[in-house]
Image (cartoon, rainbow, N blue to C red):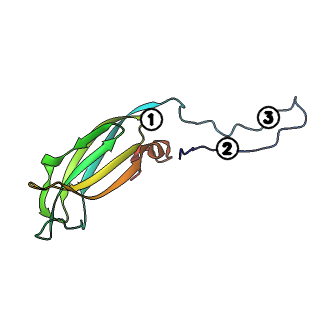
């Protein structure tokens, strides 16, 4: 289902059409046209990952998806740990609100079999863009 984000305020208009109108409520609205943004994602570390290997550990790496763009950092996997320190920065371009959902996934690297997904989260970039905290919110 599509979602709609918005704000509204209902206030009475004066009976006399010549009198002044109530003060405008929405003076600082963001632009309504699509915004081209640079998205920087800093992945510092992961904690207490689910073990996926026979040795009770995993070889974690990051996979990002934003719109039709996918970044697969399989070569940057961190071997044999449940608490990997990635220390990586990824930079993508986004047109908000057209591609607003950034999917961040953690996979277990396997040399012989297919890589397994450990977990994922989706970050709503439009919500961050329109937040009163701006791009600084965590």
Label 3 element class: loop
Number of numbered discs present? Answer: 3
Is residue 112 shown left or right of residue 39?
left
Left or right, residue 23 beside residue 114: right
Instruction: Answer whether labels 1 and 2 touch (C-beta < 8 Å).
Output: no
Q: Which mark is residue 124?
A: none
In the rendered view, would you say 16 is above or below 74? above
Question: Is residue 135 or residue 59 the one in the foreground?
Answer: 59
Q: Earlier in the sequence, mark 1 or mark 3?
A: 3
Residue behind mark 1:
98
User: At 9% across and 55% down in the image, what residue appears?
Assistant: 112
Query: Disc 1 versus disc 2: distance between alpha carbons?
Result: 23 Å
Work out which residue is located at the far bottom of the displayed protein and give it: 56
Write down the residue under mark 3.
21
Residue 125: x percent and y percent? 42, 44
Q: CA distance from mark 3 to mark 2?
A: 17 Å
In this view, the residue in front, 55 or 31, is 55
At horizontal 63% and vertical 44% (from top left) the residue drawn is 7
Viewer-side label of 1, 2: 1
- Depth-wise, is mark 3 or mark 2 nearer the camera? 2
Which disc is residue 8 wearing? 2
Residue 2, position as x, y percentages in the image: 53, 44
Quadrant in which residue 36 is drawn:
top left
Residue drawn at x 20%, y 64% is 83
Q: CA distance from mark 1 to mark 3?
A: 36 Å
- 121 shown above or below 126: below
- Relative image position of residue 129 (x, y in whole percent): 45, 42
Q: Are marks 1 and 3 in contact (CB under 8 Å)?
A: no
Q: Position of residue 55 (x, y in %)?
A: 10, 70
């Amino acid at each position: 289902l599509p979602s709609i984000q918005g704000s509204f305020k209902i206030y009475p208009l004066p009976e006399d059409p010549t009198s002044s109108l109530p003060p405008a409520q929405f003076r600082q609205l963001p632009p309504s046209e699509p915004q081209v943004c640079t998205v920087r994602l800093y992945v510092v570390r992961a904690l207490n990952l689910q073990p996926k290997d026979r040795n009770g550990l995993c070889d974690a790496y990051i996979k990002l998806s934003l719109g039709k763009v996918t970044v697969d950092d399989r070569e940057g996997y961190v071997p044999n740990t449940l608490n990997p320190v990635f220390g990586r920065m990824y930079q993508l371009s986004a047109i908000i609100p057209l591609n607003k959902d950034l999917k961040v996934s953690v996979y277990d690297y396997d040399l012989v079999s297919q890589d397994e997904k450990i977990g994922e989260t989706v970050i709503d970039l439009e919500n961050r863009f329109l937040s009163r905290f701006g791009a600084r919110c965590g």
